[in-house]
Image: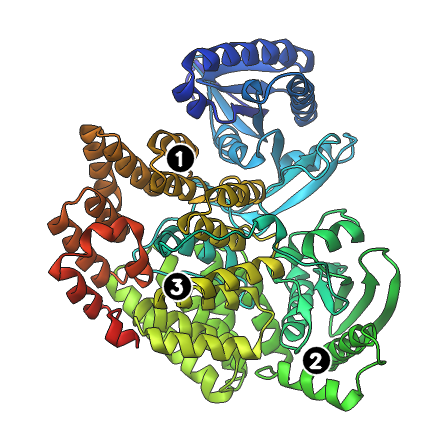
Amino acid sequence: MSDHEQRRLAAIMFTDMVGYSALSQRDDKLALELLEEHRRLLREIFPRFNGVEIKTIGDAFLVEFGSALEAAQCAIEIQRVFSKRNLDVAAGRRVELKIGIHIGDVVHREGDVYGDGVNIASRIEPLAGAGGICISMDVERQIRNALEARFEKFSSAELKNIKLPMELFRIVLPWQAGGARLESSRGIQTPKKSSLPIFVGAAILGIALILGWWFVQRQGRAAATAGPTNESPTHIANAPGQNSVAVLPFINMSDDKGSEYFSDGISEELLTVLQKIPGLHVAARTSAFSFKGKNATAQEIGQKLGVAHLVDGSVRKSGDNVRIAARLTRADTGEQLWSENYTRGLKDVFAVQTELAQTIVEKLRGQLGGGAAADPAVQAQVQAAEKGGTKNVQSHEQYLRGRFYGNRNTEKGAGDAQAAYEKAVQLDPQFALAWAGLAYTHVWICGYSTGFGRTGFDEHLARAREASARALALEPNLPEALLTRALIQLNFDYDWKGANETSKAALVLAPANAQLLILAGNVALAKGDVDATTALYRKAVELDPVNAESRSFLAFHLAATGSLADARAEYARVLELSPTAPWAHAGLGLALIRAGKFEEALTATQDESADWARQLVVAIAQWGQKQNAESDAALAKLIETSADTAAYQIAQVYSYRNEKDKAFEWLGRAHRQRDGGLPGLRYDPFLVNLHADPRWNKFLHTVGLADEQLN
């Protein structure tokens, strides 16, 4: 290290104004005025907590503190000051900040600061949300006993350009009751858009959210140009019926904190079984697990999930023994209706799970009037719902690990999940659910991994087909395996009829599975049944109301079918649940383009986290504004950065610009790349300029979407 460098441990804070770039484009004078006010207020606060301003970067501050506690106290004071300020000003003059804090090794060099401490703080700051504070686990450890505040844990995640996954926390601010929260179910790193498509996730297999975002990115924009719907998204869920329930994640009480996979798995398996019981309304996994680690009341959870009952509990695993405690409560009052403790050997955990499911079904049906269901009938239904399992303890543990790793929604998580599932089927080759999990993981890798070329893709797809076939050979009516078969049929084989039949069969077997509903909606969209698509998306949101993925499907569908006001309201919910999710801003941008509001589209897309999606909207909107040179530049950038992963989007731009030869060239490339935008091809409003061209029907026939083929 040179004489001009100093290395030390420091707490680093990054702050950023929300929406400043968009405001600058709308009203440069107002933006500068608010920027200066924001700087003045912050510079009055930093010294009170011994904060040293290192530099400003546009509307952002980089500040160094001697301790994590001082940095956290400063952040809370900043948000308190701006929250109070915003109460007294018009909406257009509000200033909201996002703050990220990390403590780590930094290097001072020539008046600037470098190192992982700086890099990580800058990466977590965007995840804080408007008015929020996001901190790393290292900060939380140092302040948890010194700061009178509550912390909400964010799931393990991978940050861009940061090698190791990190645990993150949100500081819950007392004036933010019910306010914006960090995403609870998906990784932080903006997923790279793959040329090898997946369009929907599966709660059963735990990789739901990333795949759902992928579909919204690649396929959701292809909704039909049907008339507007009059239904408001504010009336999606009905009052909860007495046969409705949410299974919350069981608490891991084991001394080994690495056993969390086991406690999560027990509750997730119970949820999955209940989803398959006819007549029960079961909240989807993503929504139910969004309350993990939070101090929400039963009433709050019941209202947000639209259920009348809650199941929660704990799991303590010690050696070859396991203790499971479970209870059933009323959501509206918190009254406990039933509870039980089970202490068994691991080999008996399967019997405990069966007894749990049977008891809960009986109790729920007893609430409906007419007494509890007859034991034999319930036993038969639970037994049918549990098919595909194993009695091999070691194989079962590997299966639970596979689901747990898959829920991380990262390439590393998928790799770990694949390894665990492979061990599971080696230990028990008759374990159909493990084969289905392995198949789905290979499909996920095909759609999202960027670490291999065409040869690797073909290998994973072949292994997905093989594992899915093994699962269905063991259990022909296994919904998890049928889901994977439908994904392959729709996205890789363009077998619309087969995908339709398979998805319908899976839904009959698991009618309360929100991800299967989305899958069925996507198939209906490919076939041109817009009304069915709308109904299926709404049902998915009813079952999974706290899942930003489900709401994104509905939001874009509303926009694409003409209900712009309703779509905007739904997008507000999406952004509250997942402010940095890809496509949330760009989806609204394309909807605004359809309405001819090009400038609004550009503004709406400024905060889009996915570069390719932003470039798509910019290229189309600027062409609509007759800014041809700017549109050319945006399109060139899209091609330069995403030619191998966004062929369908490039075709959309060329079609909108009425450059038909180029549009068909890129559609052909999308077909060769197995692009997931193609299922909605016929109903994409940005391809209408191609419909009168003789090549259009020929291409539809190539991908199996001609009228005679669909009929």
In this figure, which residue is indicated by the disc labeled 2? Answer: 350
Mark 2 or mark 3: name the one nearer the start of the chain: 2
In depth, the one of 199 and 466 nearer the eye is 199
Q: Which of marks 1 and 3 is in front?
A: 3
> Where is residue 460 drawn, in percent x and y?
34, 69
Q: Residue 78 — which label?
A: none
Q: What is the total number of numbered labels drawn onto the structure image?
A: 3
Residue type at mark 2 is Phe
In this figure, which residue is indicated by the disc labeled 3? Answer: 525
**What is the CA distance from the residue labelled 1 to the residue labelled 3?**
25 Å
Instruction: Answer with left or right where residue 296 lies relative to residue 594.
Output: right
Instruction: Answer with left or right where residue 514 lies relative to residue 352.
Output: left
Residue type at mark 1 is Thr
Mark 3 neighbour density, 10 Å: few (under 14) some (14–19) many (20 or more):
many
In depth, the one of 233 and 549 nearer the eye is 233
Q: Can residue 400 be seen in this view?
A: yes
In this figure, which residue is indicated by the disc labeled 1? Answer: 605
Q: Secondary structure beneath disc 2?
A: helix
Residue type at mark 3 is Leu
Q: Secondary structure beneath disc 1?
A: loop
